[in-house]
Amino acid sequence: MNLHLKKGSPLQQKTACLVLGVFEGKFKTPLLKELDQALGGALGRAVRDGEFTGKVRETVLFHPGKALPAERVLLAGLGKEKSAGLEYLRQVAGTVSGALQSRRIHSFACNFLSLPVRGGGLAERAQAIAEGLLLGTYRFDRFRTENGKELPPPLKDGVLLVDKQAEVTAARRGLDEARAICRGVCLARDLVNEPGNVKSPEYLAQTARTLADEGSFALRVLERDALEKEGFGGLLGVAQGSVREPRLIVMEYSGGSSEAKPIVLVGKGVVFDAGGISLKPAEKMDEMKMDMAGAAAVLGTFQAVAALKLPINLVGIVPAVENMPSGSAMRPGDILTSLSGRTIEVLNTDAEGRLILADALTWAKRYEPRLVIDLATLTGACVIALGHQATAVLGNHDGLIRQLIRAGENSGERLWQLPLWDEYAAQLKSDVADLKNTGGRPAGTITAAAFLQKFAEDTSWAHLDIAGTAWEEKGRPYVPKGGTGVGVRLLVHYLKTVAGA
Ligand code: BES
Ligand code: MN
Ligand code: ZN
């Protein structure tokens, strides 16, 4: 969808659909009074009959005929005025763009930028609105050859109206930013939605190659020979059961000064997690194609960061592998020697994420990073603890965690911290090796993080468990069913603060 900014008054717009935001119960504004008059009192009647109250996500459509230059008028509920913030704008914009698209309306003009909301200047508000609009119309229709023909055509043009010409300039920055970020989010969603028979580890590497060319950053892909030579015991152990060859994908973006130490992002890239010999149950196993959502978030973030030319140095590390059962698969009881030299007793082959992340975290140390953030669909226990509302954050650096939580609040991708006290590490003691790969049922998300902490060593590090937030089952205002692309908005927001941009 193309988005534009324009100075102009709403009721004078010639558009396929004029969209106006309305706070709950606030129908006496000059604009709405004028609209009601033009509609011959139709708005007043809809309100009187309870058809429209202004609650969040509510919409009502009018056809004004000759009374207005607009062909249609859509009123969108914004909820209570005092509680409206940037996330409200995203949700309202997402609902509206979805509603317009499903009504087969091709273009619209909205007044969302003149709404009084808490937090954020014009650029931030424009960004939030554009994010909602762009993400709300996302769909994954690549494989729909028959029923895809019934899908409404994509929404084409959107106009954000402003009162003064000066505001166009201020808001433009927000729009540009949203475009870059949403491209990254939609790439991440596509990668997660792609079925397992399409996305091999090499497929992820190929995607990274395309991004590196487009964004002019460096890329190195380690294949089996190199992985064996270096000693990636964790990654190779998991890869053993699959006919697909593993990859270590390393992206290097240099936007900062040459002395500045990089931030390293690590993303779990299990392209399909059958569980290995500790096989998962059949029910919902299909969803385990999403076990590379951490990798998708890192790739999407690189696309956005390169497009925005952020003045930072960033390294992305994606261990990509498939976890399958077979005659050559690793067994429960096997002992692997990780890249760090630490030995790991594999008690459950389904706890594979930490095995590949351990090696990736060790590889990260080569860069003497300023800090490391990993993203992984790591534990089912995280879904039990936090559901689908928040990503779990744990780590060894409270300042970093606080900044990430703040970025989560501002970007609309919320985080919640879990403790990582030393005592939890006791659950990982092995009788025969340095560590075992499961800590039993209690505090599954925490013991998984405690495992990773051993490999992060003294590097400032935060771990994001996105098991509950990477996949949407029902569909929310700007998050359709399937891959959510979680992590991209959060990380870009965080990296922008770090860059001081
Ligand atoms: N990829 C899964 C975790 C997962 C579960 C992600 C549900 C998204 C939704 C991970 O590899 C896994 O299987 N973890 C095990 C660990 C256990 C064996 C210690 C789990 O959570 O059951
Ligand atoms: Mn698993
Ligand atoms: Zn997994």
Image (cartoon, rainbow, N blue to C red):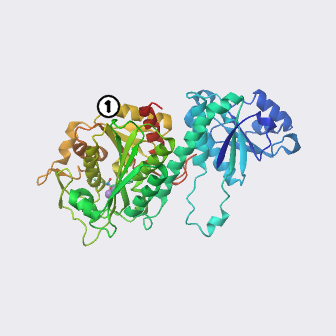
Q: Is residue 400 visible?
A: yes
Between 308 and 238, the one nearer to me in the picture = 308
Is 62 located above or below residue 32 in the figure?
below
User: Which quadrant of the figure has residue 345?
Assistant: bottom left
Horizontal arrangement in the rendering, residue 371 relative to residue 21 (left or right): left
Q: Quadrant of ligand 3?
A: bottom left
Q: Amino acid at mark 1?
A: Asp
Q: In percent of the image, x 65 and y 61: which residue is there?
A: 151
Element class at badge 1 = helix
Is 176 located above or below residue 348 in the figure?
above
Horizontal arrangement in the rendering, residue 284 relative to residue 442 (left or right): right
Place of residue 143 in the rendered image (x, y in percent of width and height, measured from the top left) = 55, 66
User: Which quadrant of the figure has residue 499?
Assistant: top left
Place of residue 113 in the rendered image (x, y in percent of width and height, measured from the top left) = 66, 33
Place of residue 1 in the rendered image (x, y in percent of width and height, measured from the top left) = 64, 50
Residue where numbered disc 1 is placed: 398
Between 67 and 249, the one nearer to me in the picture = 249
Q: How many marks?
A: 1
Q: Is residue 347 visible?
A: no
Q: Outermost residue toward the bottom?
A: 327
Place of residue 322 in the rendered image (x, y in percent of width and height, measured from the top left) = 34, 63
Between 241 and 373, the one nearer to me in the picture = 373
Is 104 located above or below residue 198 in the figure?
above
Between 256 and 45, the one nearer to me in the picture = 256
Is 196 located above or below residue 27 in the figure?
below
Q: Outermost residue toward the right?
A: 66
- Ligand 1 under 8 Å from disc 1 Cβ: no
Q: In percent of the image, x 50 and y 41: which residue is there?
A: 308
Q: Residues within 10 Å of mark 1 (few under 14, many from 20)?
A: some
